Amino acid sequence: MSDDANAGGDAAEPAEGAAVSARGQATRARLLAGARAAILEGGGTLEVAAVARRAGVSAGLLYRYFAGKDGLVAAVVDDFYDSYDGEVFTTRLDGALSWPEREHARLRREIDFLCDAPLGRMIVGRRLREPAAAQTDAQRLARQIDIAARSIAKAQREGELDGSFSPRLAAAATLGAFRELMAEALSGDADPPRAELHEAMWRVGSSLLLHSPASDSSSSR
């Protein structure tokens, strides 16, 4: 029996066994894929009925999985950030490199990911105009700041970074600047100048994280 046929009754709910669970996961994946495609084709807007048609299910079944349009939009943004974090924030780079060397390479990976990901322009470039997207985006950015703050704190403990500033404030400052830079770069349709973006952001980040106040006072004498 199809998902559409089940949408009006309790039989649509996963009941028991791995096969039912797999079917439910497949349906959810189809809905997410349909939502991503609809957002890209719609220039940042989403209609529930169009997503349901793409996935081959009824609109009522969509509400069982995502509790409405806002839930679906949030799931799309979360799915994007899961890939983003896995590619950039939680991946392990060469441990033999110094912290600045690792972060220099990580920054390049981050720019490449956001420029290449189909939803990069929509989410980071602020074209996704659904209210639920902004809330989920803010939550996931806060999580990235947590990850970056832990990395900075570890580098401070190991003597690779100046320890006179707050790791969380430093993470918020650098990630905030990066997000504004990428929002501007991804706001148009042209391919962003990746090398220029990398150089600009590295100068901003290194001026905060790698510059010791002690060197300032000594150079001014």
Image: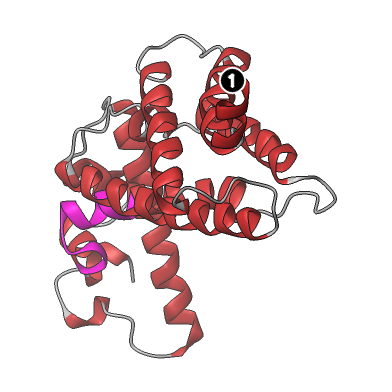
Q: Residue furthest top?
A: 190
Which amino acid type corresponds to the residue marked 1 in the rendered image? Arg
Residue 212 visible somewhere in the drawing: no
Q: Is residue 82 magenta?
A: no
**Quadrant showing the N terminus:** bottom left
**Where does the magenta region start and end?**
64-76
Indicate the quadrant where residue 39 lies.
top left
Residue at 26% across, 30% down:
44
| 179 versus 149 height, above or below | above
The residue carrying pointer 1 sits among few (fewer than 14), some (14 to 19) or many (20 or more) residues within 10 Å by Cα, namely few
SS category of the residue bearing label 1:
loop
| Percent x, y of residue 160 | 69, 48
| Percent x, y of residue 214 | 59, 36
Q: Residue furthest bottom?
A: 16
| Percent x, y of residue 51 | 26, 45
What is the count of numbered marks?
1
Residue at 69% across, 39% down:
100
- Residue that label 1 marks: 221
**Quadrant showing the C terminus:** top right
Residue 106 visible somewhere in the drawing: yes
Relative to 109, 119 lies left or right = left
What secondary structure prevails in the magenta region? helix
